[in-house]
Image: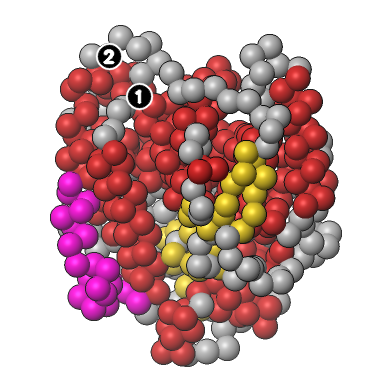
């Protein structure tokens, strides 16, 4: 059976050069040229690029997302992400994937979300106490301190030293850079030619050792909501011979949570701040809502349930600039989608960036309109909105990410006046320059200056 999908208008070499220079722009241009799904020639062979929500819907509901790696992950894997994280939620399939999701389910229950919100508020006041005293801060780095603390204390219940946190962030940044090169250039070019690959395995092993050193002490912690304590208990009680109940399995999962949870909120919140520099009218609405939320609170804090507009702002940011604009999977078995045959072991690219900007599913897709989400967050089919994936492989922490992002926006603008350190170009908010390294980052970073607003109050970290 021959595939009916059109091919991208370039050969393998030209495609590789284009992808190396501008990956997302290249994929989006090809989508526009063929007006839909297409086959992309790549160093890995034909890649099937999906830009249609009906195909995503079919895969997530009917075919049960049968499109992830099948073989167990080993330390010798050429994939940098698998070298670091091993078998975890993003790279596993079948029983492993189900086991991870079952283990994590309680971590994102409603009462846990309330706990995480409290940790975030305390972390925010602690980590931002000297922002206004600095001439400039690199926003993505500073907000990363807060999100990492929420993961460490709120989810994992682990304390890391400043040096350990720096190493964790450097390693994750390196793995994202290498993973981008791995996808575009292939494993040989990434491991042999890339200067970023030098010393990576040593960095990854050190990060795994950091997590390994924390397990024993935290496992004995009487804190009833300790993630590690619950995870170890579940691991020890499982009778499946497929599951390795040893330390490596636990470390894999803890690393997976950290890698998946750190940059999603960090990157998306940075994009929100960059967009809001161009939209002071939206900032004023965020502030007005935050003021009402604080006045209605018994402890003078902002309740995340009372800031729907800030949540809509964060959702609209995720639409225009999804942290992971390209979702990459591999077929386990041969699949037929419509009249298209996709062989087993084929690469499948889901181009969320293009889908989110398609006028068939979003009115005025190039406009930043938070109001489109008011009271209708999931009114649009999930298959057209993929910042967290869809179906059984949808991110389990999606609601926590929305709480963190919307709460951070509200807290920042309630406490500070914000201005850019350097002059920014006059861009349509939908086409601000970006850099792709698995995630979609603001090109050149975002140095900002913060000035305390006179009315704002804060609490210390306890």
In this rendering, position of residue 375 left or right of residue 400: right
As rendered, which of 265 and 284 lies closer to the eye?
Answer: 284
Residue holding disc 2: 221
Label number found at residue 157: 1
For the C terminus, the quadrant is: top left
Give the overall secondary structure of the magenta segment: helix
Q: Where 66 falls versus 178 (above or below)?
A: above
Of the image marks 2 and 1, the number of the one nearer the N terminus? 1
- In percent of the image, x 46 and y 90: which residue is there? 14
- In percent of the image, x 29 and y 39: which residue is there? 162
In this rendering, position of residue 86 left or right of residue 3: left
Crowding around mark 1 (Cα neighbors within 10 Å: few <14, some 14 to 19, many 20+) is: many
Magenta range is 185-206
In this rendering, position of residue 423 left or right of residue 376: left
As rendered, which of 35 and 168 lies closer to the eye?
Answer: 168
Is residue 201 magenta-colored? Answer: yes
């Amino acid at each position: 059976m021959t595939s009916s999908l059109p091919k991208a208008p370039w050969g393998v070499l030209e495609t590789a050069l284009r992808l190396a220079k501008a990956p997302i722009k290249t994929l989006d241009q090809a989508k526009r040229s063929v007006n839909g799904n297409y086959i992309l020639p790549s160093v890995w062979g034909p890649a099937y690029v999906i830009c249609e929500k009906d195909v995503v819907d079919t895969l997530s509901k009917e075919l049960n997302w049968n499109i992830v790696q099948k073989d167990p992950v080993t330390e010798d894997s050429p994939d940098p992400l698998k070298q670091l994280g091993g078998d975890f939620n993003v790279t596993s399939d079948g029983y492993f994937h189900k086991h991870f999701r079952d283990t994590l389910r309680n971590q994102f229950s409603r009462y846990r979300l309330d706990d995480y919100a409290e940790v975030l508020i305390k972390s925010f006041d602690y980590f931002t106490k000297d922002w206004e005293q600095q001439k400039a801060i690199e926003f993505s780095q500073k907000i990363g301190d807060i999100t990492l603390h929420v993961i460490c204390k709120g989810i994992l219940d682990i304390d890391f030293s400043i040096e350990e946190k720096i190493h964790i962030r450097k390693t994750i940044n390196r793995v994202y850079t290498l993973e981008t090169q791995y996808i575009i250039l292939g494993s040989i070019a990434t491991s042999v030619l890339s200067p970023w690959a030098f010393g990576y395995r040593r960095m990854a092993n050190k990060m795994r050792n950091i997590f390994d050193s924390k397990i024993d002490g935290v496992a004995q912690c009487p804190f009833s909501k300790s993630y590690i304590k619950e995870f170890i208990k579940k691991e020890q009680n499982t009778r499946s011979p497929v599951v390795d109940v040893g330390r490596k399995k636990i470390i894999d999962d803890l690393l997976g949570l950290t890698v998946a949870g750190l940059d999603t909120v960090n990157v998306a919140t940075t994009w929100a701040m960059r967009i809001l520099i161009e939209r002071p009218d939206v900032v004023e609405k965020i502030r007005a809502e935050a003021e009402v939320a604080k006045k209605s609170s018994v402890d003078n804090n902002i309740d995340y349930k009372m800031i729907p507009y800030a949540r809509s702002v964060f959702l609209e940011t995720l639409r225009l600039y999804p942290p992971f604009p390209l979702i990459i999977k591999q077929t386990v078995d041969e699949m037929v989608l419509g009249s298209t045959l996709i062989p087993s072991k084929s690469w499948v690219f889901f181009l969320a960036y293009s889908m989110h900007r398609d006028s068939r599913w979003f009115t005025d897709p190039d406009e930043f309109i938070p109001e489109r989400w008011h009271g209708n967050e999931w009114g649009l089919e999930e298959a057209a909105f993929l910042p967290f994936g869809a179906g059984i492989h949808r991110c389990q922490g999606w609601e926590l990410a929305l709480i963190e992002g919307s709460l951070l926006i509200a807290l920042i603008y309630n406490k500070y006046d914000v201005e850019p350190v350097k002059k920014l170009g006059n861009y349509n908010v939908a086409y601000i320059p970006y850099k792709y390294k698995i995630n979609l980052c603001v090109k050149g970073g975002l140095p900002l200056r913060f000035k305390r607003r006179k009315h704002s109050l804060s609490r210390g970290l306890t």
